[in-house]
Image (cartoon, rainbow, N blue to C red):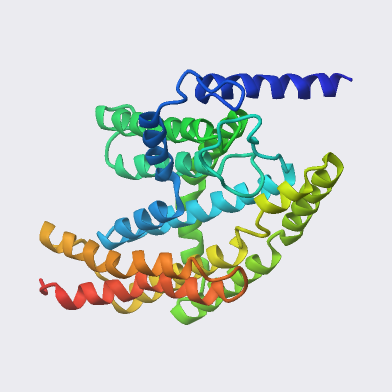
Amino acid sequence: MIFLTLLNYWYVWDLGILWTIQGSFWTPLGFLGGNTIFDSFWRVVTSLGDDIILFMLVGVIYWLGYKREGIFLALILVFSAFINYSLKYLIGRPRPTFYEARKLYFPEGPSMPSGHAQTTTATAFTIAWLAKRGVPLVSKRGIILFLLAAIISVLVSISRIYLGAHWPTDVILGLLIGLLVFGAYVLIAERAWNFLNAKLPESPWIRILIVIAIFLIVAVALPFNWEVGWYIYLLTAGYITGTLPFTLLTIYPFEWGMGWYLTGAVAGFLSGAILEQKYIQFTVPSSWKYAVLRLIIGALIALPGYYLIDKIPWGPLQFPVYAILGLWVTLITPAIFKKLEPKP
């Protein structure tokens, strides 16, 4: 009885905050809802947490010669994504429906925790930490950087509620986990980096084999059964409630396919970085003109490539194809940069 009371209170609180922020089927004029300008604004804000933005952000940092920072950020993103994926399917909370929210955004899969809130928070605070290096945390530069990180994290989190993609408690949990991921990075990243560099064989090819083996194991071992269980749960609930036809029209099985595409991209990214460090060793661009040229060259292939291979059906084929995209970021483009730029 106590558990049911708490669960009901949680739901009512979530619903009240949701309706207050964006309105719903029942209350179309919420505090911020029912305005096309607001709708467009929050769609733009929520895009800051999209995969393509984060992917290009890692690429930009790496292409500008901040290779170690780019590698750290890529690992933070994949680590955060694995945590989020696992928790979503372990918790198995359905997203707000048309009867509970004014739906302007239609993601698939379970709702808690919010991936956008979690990943944006981990990314924003990690970048702030990397950018403040050389100055104390409590300094004008440090305070401004972390204040910007907090503002971006909160805005993206609010956008998920406004668009009807998540419950308020989904984004609160996402924010907290994002901060925990950032904290873990601050505490162990440098130590882990130095430890692995000291313990791993010096041969780049052996390191690459280790990377590929690890991420192939992760891809196969990722909880595919959790997705199966989630969709069985949805279909069963639809049958019991008499909404099965609607359920069949609104779910797309295994929409993430994350075990293959994300591990493939990271395996390619890290493998390319290992080879780049051994054979290319490009540095920070010599001028802003070459910096812009790098970004243009990198984006000309990376952006179309990302959208093209994103259409590949879920499955093992995604691993090698996304690995090639990762190689483009950390190996192929640096080789082009080295050829185009004048030698010092």
Q: Position of residue 180 (x, y in %)?
A: 55, 38
Q: Position of residue 155 (x, y in %)?
A: 42, 31
Q: Is residue 159 visible?
A: yes
Which residue shows up at 64% across the image and 24% down it? 14
In-front residue for pair 336/24: 24
Q: Is residue 183 visible?
A: no
Q: Quadrant of the C terminus?
A: bottom left
In-front residue for pair 342/32: 32
* Quarter holding residue 328: bottom left
In the displayed structure, does residue 259 sit left or right of residue 192? Answer: right
- Vertical placement of 53 versus 331: above or below? above
Which residue shows up at 25% across the image and 59% down it? 64
- Vertical placement of 142 versus 49: above or below? above
In the displayed structure, does residue 163 sit left or right of residue 93? Answer: left
In the displayed structure, does residue 32 sit left or right of residue 177? Answer: left
Q: Quadrant of the N terminus?
A: top right
- Vertical placement of 79 versus 116: above or below? below
* Quarter holding residue 148: top left
* Quarter holding residue 65: bottom left
